[in-house]
Amino acid sequence: MTHYEGERRSTPAPTANTPPRMLRERRRTPRNPLQAPLPAPPRPAHPLPDPSDWNFELLEQYHDAIRAAAQRFGLDTYPNQLEIITAEQMMDAYSSVGMPVNYRHWSYGKEFIANEKNYRRGHMGLAYEIVINSDPCISYLMEENSTAMQALVIAHAAYGHNSFFKGNYLFKLWTDASSIIDYLVYAKNYIAECEERYGLLQVEELIDSCHALQNYGVDRYRRPSKLSLAEERARRKERLEHAQLQVNDIWRTLPKKPDKAEDSTDTKRFPGEPQENLLYFIEKNAPLLEPWQREVVRIVRKIAQYFYPQRQTQVMNEGWATFWHHHLLNTLYDQGHLTDGVMIEWLKSHTNVVFQPPVGHPAYSGLNPYALGFAMYTDIKRICENPTDEDREWFPSFAGHPWLPTLDHAMRNFKDESFVGQYLSPKVMRDMRLFAIVDDENAENLSVSAIHDVSGFRHVREALSRQYDLSSREPDIQVWNVNLRGDRSLTLRHTQNNNRPLHETAQEVLKHVARLWGFGVQLDSVDNTGAVTKHWSVPAPPQ
Amino acid sequence: MLQQIIDRRLAGKNKSIGNRERFLRRHHEQVREAVRRAVDGRGIRDMERGENISIPKKDISEPVFGHGQGGTREMVHPGNREYVTGDQIERPKGGGQGSGRGQASDSGEGEDDFVFHLTKEEFMQIFFDDLALPRMTQTQLAETPEWKSHRAGFVSDGTPSNLSVVRSMRGAIGRRLAIGSISRGELRELEDDLEELLAWPVDAKREAERERLEARIAELRNRLDRIPFLDPIDLRFRNRVKVPVPTTKAVMFCLMDVSGSMDEARKELSKRFFILLYLFLTRHYDKIDLVFIRHHTQAQEVDEENFFHARETGGTVVSSALVLMDEIIKARYSPTEWNIYGAQASDGDNWHHDSGRCRELLTDNLLPVCRYFAYVQVAEEEQNLWEEYMRLQETHPHFAMRKVTQASQIYPVFRDLFKKEGAAA
């Protein structure tokens, strides 16, 4: 299936944790979403020309029409930069995680070779477009596309994705669109410099190890900002006062148990709290890393952080872009801007994109985020405009309300997990015939836990919401302890989710961790009773 | 809102090439092994094409933490047809995962090897890895018979055909201005004085003054008139310098023994060696001539087809081929214009009085004009020709000899012969 690319990537994507300092500087203009579409301009005398070959003038015309339509619906976007590229450049962009520049690494070469091979054999259609979360927002248009396809891509990427990038809270929180390209240029140059100075092999090994951990190089929550001296003093005063209140002299009379005191110092762990950002922990604490190595760890970590929102908003992001290209182009057609030929052509692609093969179909490979997201946004609009009794019962907060602000709210304030949990309607579940299957290794058979009926809607919705929860998709692994008094070995702890074990590649990944840490590394897998069920360990790498 | 539409199609082609290089470098061993196998298996004439390289998936995987089989999980699927809540479904056999996670592997084909295509250039590059053309640099610097002329500014002497009129005239104007400026200034002042003087009524004193001024003015005018319009010192000529151009022409002599003792297998070995050398030379020269000389008791120059496939019988006189080679060089390939390479293959059999003469021929006539001369013996036993040649090897660094008895040895021996100078033997 030809599909849009954008953020949907099978490879774990590398990041940019925007420093909180910069985030605070960013202006937050309070905005009021449009309550209803602005009035339509007068109908044009002729529809836009539709030769199958595009040219620059035509692109501008289509873009102007689409922009005007988008403004009517109040889509708030970064400025657009459309770039025309060839198929080969598209594959280049593919292989460097969709970014226009990136540092050099063999894995991108591998990716390119694999893509090129599949493309040549006809196994894979190239994405029509790639769009980059930057300011201005860069959308790549492939030269092979016809005029109608370019219009589709402009509506999808330059207005759909673009407004999502600008509006969604995760992107606002974790990415800085205006600086990402500069940062990547810096990263590329820095790593090239390191390669020159320290040798290709060393740098490559280091990046390999970082890549192995890049999904564990993201902050899921904001670090609290540093306290100012005054705040610190006030806190300390408060703490002391509180301690004073707690003094209870009675307990002083009890003799101190000598062994217990020692015990408590022994069991004191470092770090005090488990740390989930492994790369950050390594960057700050690995004893043997050279400064340049810490910087490389940091670069990989930042790029991973930049892609973190994309991994959490596949359904929302693709659904939003798909909904808007569908809505914008239809609006333009209704106003007489588009010819029937253009309509039929993009609708064909649109249909391919939102096709959801049923389970058991040879093409089935899980839920199609385009199909699910498109169905959900479309249904939210329907619930607003033509609510049924069922909708009023399920969605009392917005059934019958204006659809534009409702959709705007749904786009801004959720990620896939919460979006599905909030907005998946019974109608969508029925239409897509969703059902949940429980796979318990202790049971003989798989069992159907819920289907799309009245008694199952809530269960299916919860199950699907959990499915999109990144923390249940990826094993929960945190830094547990460092043996500070002994061999400095690092202990990681995997907390099992529903007793699901780790994949056997864990041993390989641990070797990478050991390479970064410089000393031995252990990994304990803990089930939900707190018992360690499996233990991996890797000795210190030879120095 | 629209910032711009940018056409990027012409920029940034092959941006991924650095990544591809890193990928190939990382899997150098596998790639090299595959190239080695391909060289063994291929016909010689189609050496110059790409090759599919396959690398086991596990060698190129990038491990990350992930969930394994087991535990409890709940998955939501679309397209329910017949199930109702509480139905039991038999666990899919074999794969275990069944319709579970649709994590299609990113490179296509599941557990198969990772296969990719090495381009012809990359194939040849790896094929000739670590090899450098022997004495190539010295050749370029020492005797470069071809020259190319380049423009190199202007000079003050040259042939009239190279005269740059514009440049010369510009120089002349400057010179005239410079030389005449003082006189012209004085002239102007005197003329002003004279005019002022003439305004007053005439008396004797003024008359004398007027004469003095007029004389001086005439003198200055005269001097200014004598400044030449164009002086030989103004002439500028376009300058051209000759830059040596390294010769890119090479001739390769293939000398092969076709006497009765050379069977097909031995000829096949020799052929491989010649073709390798030919391919090697094509890396460095634009134009390569091939001369095939076969010999038994007499030598003759033949075409490629006859060289490899015709069969003769009889004794062997190796020197006959060397003599013929020498004659051909003198007649057609002047060493000042051509880089001459010699490659000789033989089973080592020779009429024993002839071997000494072979050595003399090489020392006196051929080695001084050859860039490189390689001898391979396609038989194990050492006869007097081998011994004579051994003596050559000590005194001539650009003479090399090896023994080859199996096809698989050809490549290593070839590499050995053309090892980068300076690399450890």
Image: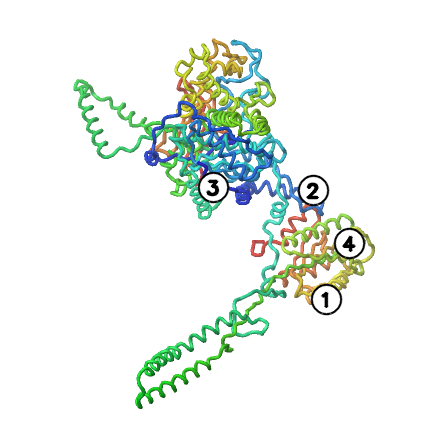
SS state under label 4: helix
Q: Do dots 1 and 4 share one subunit?
A: yes
Task: Tell me the mark number nearer the camera, choosing from 2 and 3.
Answer: 3
Residue occupying the far bottom of the picture = B204
Compared with A364, B202 (above or below) is below
Say what amino acid the circle numbered 1 marks: Lys
What label sits on residue B307 in the rendered view? 4
Compared with A298, A247 (above or below) is above
- Viewer-side residue, B58 vs B395: B58
Mark 3 chain? A
Residue corresponding to mark 3: A103
Mark 1 chain? B
Residue B41, position as x, y percentages in the image: 69, 42
| Mark 1 and mark 3 residues within 8 Å of each other at the beta carbon | no
| Mark 1 and mark 2 residues within 8 Å of each other at the beta carbon | no
What label sits on residue B330 in the rendered view? 1
Q: Earlier along the polypeptide chain: callout 1 or callout 2?
A: 2
| Mark 2 and mark 4 residues within 8 Å of each other at the beta carbon | no
Q: Do dots 4 and 3 share one subunit?
A: no
- Viewer-side residue, B388 vs B11: B11
Say what amino acid the circle numbered 3 marks: Tyr
| Mark 1 and mark 4 residues within 8 Å of each other at the beta carbon | no
Quarter of the image holding residue A423? top left
Query: Is residue B234 rendered to the left or right of residue B33?
Result: left
Q: Earlier along the polypeptide chain: callout 1 or callout 4?
A: 4
Residue B383 shows in the view: yes
SS state under label 1: helix
Q: Earlier along the polypeptide chain: callout 2 or callout 4?
A: 2
